[in-house]
Image (spheres, grey):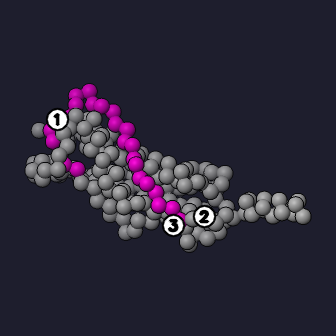
Amino acid sequence: MKKASLILLGALALGGCALSPQEVDVTPKIAVEKPVEPLQGTVSVTVYDERLSRSLGHRGGVYSDTNDITTNDRLTLAIRSAVEMSLREMGLTVTESEDVPQFQVYLDDLEYKVPEGSYITQVDLKAKVRVRIIKDGQRFEGVYATEITERVPKAPSDEKNEELINQVLSDVLSRALADPKLTGFLKQA
């Protein structure tokens, strides 16, 4: 009897697990290189979530229709905070004034996908942002995208999902702020 119970527990553990919905706490960390000549000036940062839904996708598994993975309500605030900190590291002053150059970040896409079926072998993530800077009647716009594929031996834990989602967001924002055309536009007097 004891052996049969252990076999049943093992089969349940190895089978397609039911995964709960997850709300992710977004805390991107942007990697910027401090420029040889620090940028000068003042900007105001605004972030817009242009996605149609807070859902990034489904966690997969047996009940994939009921296990959405979503971002929390502080997504735009977290992105704004990370961008502001990076711009300060680059030498700029950040304010909330509308009378200074406007640095706008638009989150167009943030996706989380797993293969169809009950067994999860990898996670595919995508992020896409647009950055628009309006300065002295001139405008800069850049589009940046990042994709990550992570091979996994089993369905990722809540912590691993959060790490992967923050990684793809951090990567796309770092790519944007490393764009020489963007920094060149900010340097113009």
Q: Quadrant of residue 54?
A: bottom left
Question: Residue 183: x, y in percent?
Answer: 24, 40
Q: Amino acid at mark 3?
A: Asp
* Dot 3 and dot 1 residues touching (CB under 8 Å): no
Query: Which of the 4 image quadrants contains residue 10?
Result: bottom right
Q: CA distance from mark 3 to mark 2?
A: 9 Å
Give the labeled residue for mark 2: 19
Tag on residue 40?
A: 1
Q: Nearer the viewer, residue 143 or 80?
A: 80
Q: Residue at x 39, y 47 (%)?
A: 28
If you read the primary sequence from the N terminus, does the residue marked by circle 3 or circle 1 appear first? 1
Q: Which residues are magenta?
A: 21-45
Mark sitting on residue 68: 3
Q: CA distance from mark 1 to mark 2?
A: 49 Å
**Residue 174 spot, x, y in % from top left:** 36, 43
Numbered disc in front, either 3 or 1: 3
